Image (cartoon, grey):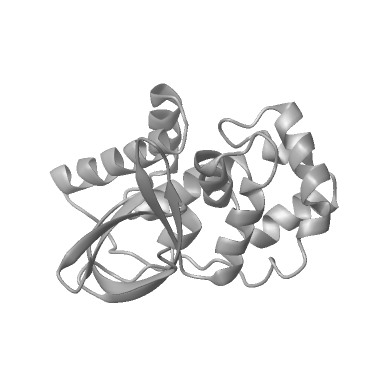
Amino acid sequence: MIGQLRGVILSKHPPQLLLDVGGVGYEVDAPMTTFYDLPAVGETVTLITHFVVREDAQILYGFLHERDRALFRALLKVTGVGARMALAILSGMDAARFAQCVEQDDSDALTRIPGIGKKTAQRLVIEMRDRLDGLVGGVVRMPGGPASAPGNARDRMLADAVSALEALGYRPPDASRMARAADDGARTAEEIIRAALRSINPA
């Protein structure tokens, strides 16, 4: 079991990042709530991880905070919720917002996350009520980015944001529309993704 990784970030392409740990490159899937607080490429980071072994793949999920991994693991115990859906939930809202939805029986907010229908949202609210203790705390911060990016760099940034939204389960047309609506010409790819997700599920 791999429970933690400390290494240098080689690349960031949400929802996946590549981490150099002693010369070995680890591909790690992470929710956007983790990506928002990651340091820049080339800097060192410590990630708390959850390792999934399947017949067809071995996948590492990484988080900056224990509360996020704990919520991720708790979500996996909910009937019908797999790792992909748990990752989408943690990308669409932080632990505090999720807890608020559960406590207020706000299943409608959960249905705005791709892949979650009304029945699944209601099941999440019911099954997670007794699992929230110790999972909530802290507010996700969004680091500032460069003031602007010219021409092709801007297009690449928008394309990265669209790809990330598609990886989180949004249909390509919806991902493109959301990213373009969230792009103000100055945001980084991660900020575009965050703004797009917040537009459909405001705190």
In the picture, measured across the screen, residue 161 lies left or right of residue 170, that is left
In the rendered image, which quarter is residue 48 located in? bottom left
Q: Residue at x 18, y 65 (%)?
A: 24
Q: Quadrant of residue 11?
A: bottom left
User: Dividing the image into 4 quarters, which one contains the N terminus?
Assistant: bottom left
Q: Residue sitting at 50 percent across and 40 percent down?
A: 84
Q: Nearer the viewer, residue 59 or 139?
A: 59
Q: Nearer the viewer, residue 110 or 65?
A: 65
Residue at 45 percent of width and 35 percent of height: 178
Q: How many marks?
A: 0
Q: In the visual, does 42 lie left or right of 2?
A: left
92 w.r.t. 167: above or below: below
148 left or right of 136 in image: left
Asked if one can make out residue 162 in the rendered structure from this viewpoint, the answer is yes
The reply, left or right, for residue 49 in relation to residue 25 is right
| Image height of 157 relative to 168, above or below | below
Would residue 186 be visible to someone looking at this image? no
Is residue 21 or residue 36 the one in the foreground?
A: 21
Q: Does residue 101 lie above or below 136 as drawn?
A: above
Which quadrant of the structure image shows residue 115?
top right
User: x%, y% of residue 65?
Assistant: 53, 71
Residue 167: % across, % down: 39, 37
Residue 2 at x, y = what percent? 40, 65
Q: Residue at x 28, y 64 (%)?
A: 146
* x and y percentages locating residue 164 in the rendered image: 37, 41
